[in-house]
């Protein structure tokens, strides 16, 4: 790889870091191409990205970004999972690591805060995703409207019930 290619890769990595809210760093040991492709596919399904790059180039790319605290953990064969959602990449990586001896979470970062492996597993991966937060908010916004409709509908049902009872009473007397 010549200097121009390295500079282009650093620029591309920096753009990925700047577009991400969270990054998970994992160490891979003997992952096959098939397993790597499987992991990439799972990550892409959730609109995240996955990258294997030279640690030295990653260190250059994260200088001056909120992910600079990750620099000391970039040793050995590392992979990076980027996400614009705070927890999507962490959830995928944690789930994948449960069934694989070839991938180990090392650290993660979210908006300048560094998490060790336990922090990624117990904090980042447990956070709700943006879609889950949106669904919860939609449910909260919908609930008052449905309750209001039920309250407004209740008096009309009571009036109909009273009229029906009166009609039944008249039918019995006739």
Image (spheres, helix red, strand yellow):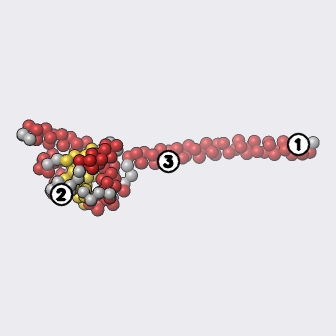
Between the C-alphas of marks 1 and 3, the distance is 46 Å
Disc 1, SS: helix
Q: Position of residue 123 (x, y in %)?
A: 33, 58
Nearer to us of marks 1 and 3 is: 1
Q: Position of residue 78 (x, y in %)?
A: 19, 53
The residue that label 2 is drawn on is: 73
Residue in the picture at 33% in, 46% down: 42
Which residue is at the front of the view, 8 or 100? 100
* Image location (x, y in percent) of residue 75: 15, 56
Task: Tell me the tag on residue 140.
Answer: 3
- Which of the 4 image quarters holds residue 61? top left
Name the one closer to the observer, 92 or 10: 92
Q: Residue at x 75, y 42 (%)?
A: 160
Which image quarter is the N terminus in? top left
Q: Which residue is mark 1?
A: 171
Classed neighbour count for the residue bearing mark 1: other residues with Cα under 10 Å, few (<14), some (14–19), many (≥20) = few
Callout 3 secondary element: helix
């Amino acid at each position: 790889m010549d200097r121009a290619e390295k500079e282009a890769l650093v620029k591309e990595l920096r753009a990925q870091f700047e577009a991400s809210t969270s990054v998970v760093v994992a160490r891979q040991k003997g992952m096959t191409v098939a397993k790597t492709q499987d992991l990439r596919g799972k990550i892409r399904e959730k609109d995240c990205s996955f990258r294997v790059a030279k640690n030295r180039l990653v260190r250059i790319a994260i200088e001056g970004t909120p992910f600079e605290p990750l620099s000391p953990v970039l040793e050995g064969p590392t992979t990076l999972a980027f996400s614009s959602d705070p927890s999507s990449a962490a959830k995928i990586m944690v789930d994948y690591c449960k069934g694989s001896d070839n991938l180990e979470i090392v650290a993660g970062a979210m908006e300048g805060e560094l998490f060790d492996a336990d922090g990624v597993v117990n904090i980042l991966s447990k956070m709700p995703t943006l879609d889950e937060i949106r669904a919860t908010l939609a449910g909260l916004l919908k609930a008052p409207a449905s309750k209001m409709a039920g309250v407004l509908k209740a008096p009309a049902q009571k009036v109909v019930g009273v009229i029906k009872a009166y009609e039944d009473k008249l039918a019995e007397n006739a």
